Image (cartoon, rainbow, N blue to C red):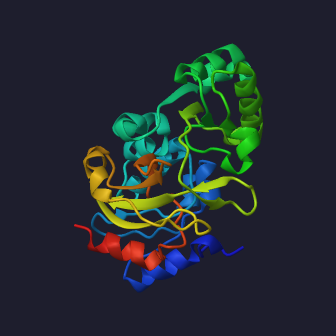
Amino acid sequence: MQPRLPDVDYCAEWDAALTLGFRTEVVDHDELVSGNMGRALRFLPELGGDPILLYSGWMMRAEAYAVFIAAIREQGFEPITSPEAFRICHHLPASFPFIEAATPPSVWIDIAHALPNGAPDWHAICGVAAKLGSGPAIIKDWVKSQKHAWSTACFIPDVSDPVAVQRIAEEFIELQGDMLVGGLVFRRFVRLLQCGVHPRSGMPLGAEVRSFWCRGRPIVMSDYWSEAPVKARPDLAEFSGIAARIPSPFFTMDLAQAEDGHWFIMEIGDGQVAGLPDGIPPQVLFSALQLSP
């Protein structure tokens, strides 16, 4: 209803950025994901020089981000994050080679092979899942899981059991619907040091933190779940070698603590579309970005 103002979810970030001296403008996300770039970018001004653009907003598919970046470059802006950097951090199969040494074993199957002609090929899906061997796993797509439907569309008690895989995967595919991205990913389940239970979904809440990194260095970190504060946070220096190899200037690294106490990488994500945990006020993040060399 007020297209020149940010969505209510981003008002705090907008105000923080303005306070710190950033220039802020809105893009129309609905038009953007529909491919109507002229309408999506109608509020962007004509600026001299080569202004650096940082997007802060709703998640979008990697394909939409690439079209978005091509359009803003035509208007004289240069993005902080290239389409390829966005894709690598946004899609787990693309980021996996960079984090493999510190993240649970994972296997995947793309949509073309998992859902030929739109219907699941359970032989192909279960065959890929079985590559993890016996034991529990979780299912997600390239980007998202259905963690709040934990017992029905996320957690698989034994990934070598094709009946269990089909039951959970079928519900996951149904819930994702048109939002399914890339294909299906199966990840070895690591039991976390439990800190609580989600009040709505009943999902177990483990010791998890979200950290933001800029040009290979950590800038802020907070508990992932406000309902489950972490007693002792990880030493991010242990992950700096991996972070230095990730080909993106701005990304998140979500870390989790296993029952035996060791910390591992849950996943990485693009910093522009990652949600801010309650423990990271927007002004803290933007100040850190402003000061980062």
- Tell me what residue is drawn at x 32 percent, y 58 percent: 236
Q: Answer with left or right where residue 292 lies relative to residue 118.
A: left
Of all residues, the one furthest to the top in this rendering is 123
Q: In this rendering, does residue 7 appear at all?
A: no
Which percent across, then down, holds residue 19? Answer: 42, 85
Of all residues, the one furthest to the bottom in this rendering is 19
Q: Which of 184 and 71 is in front in this view?
A: 184
For residue 234, above or below residue 10: above
Q: Where on the picture, by quarter, is residue 31?
A: bottom right
Of all residues, the one furthest to the front in this rendering is 260
- Tell me what residue is drawn at x 64 percent, y 15 percent: 124
- Image quarter hosting the N terminus: bottom right
Which percent across, then down, holds residue 50? Answer: 29, 63
For residue 22, above or below residue 107: below
- Image quarter hosting the C terminus: bottom left
Q: Answer with left or right where residue 41 lies relative to residue 234.
A: right
- Tell me what residue is drawn at x 57 percent, y 77 percent: 11
Of all residues, the one furthest to the left in this rendering is 293
Which percent across, then down, holds residue 137? Answer: 60, 34
Q: Where on the picture, by quarter, is residue 291?
A: bottom left
Which percent across, then down, holds residue 224? Answer: 53, 62
Q: In this rendering, does residue 213 appear at all?
A: yes
Q: Answer with left or right where residue 108 lies relative to residue 102.
A: right
Q: Which of 75 and 163 is in front in this view?
A: 163
Q: Which of 216 and 101 is in front in this view?
A: 101
For residue 238, above or below residue 155: below
Q: Where on the picture, by quarter, is residue 27?
A: bottom right
For residue 285, above or below residue 73: below
Total residue callouts = 0
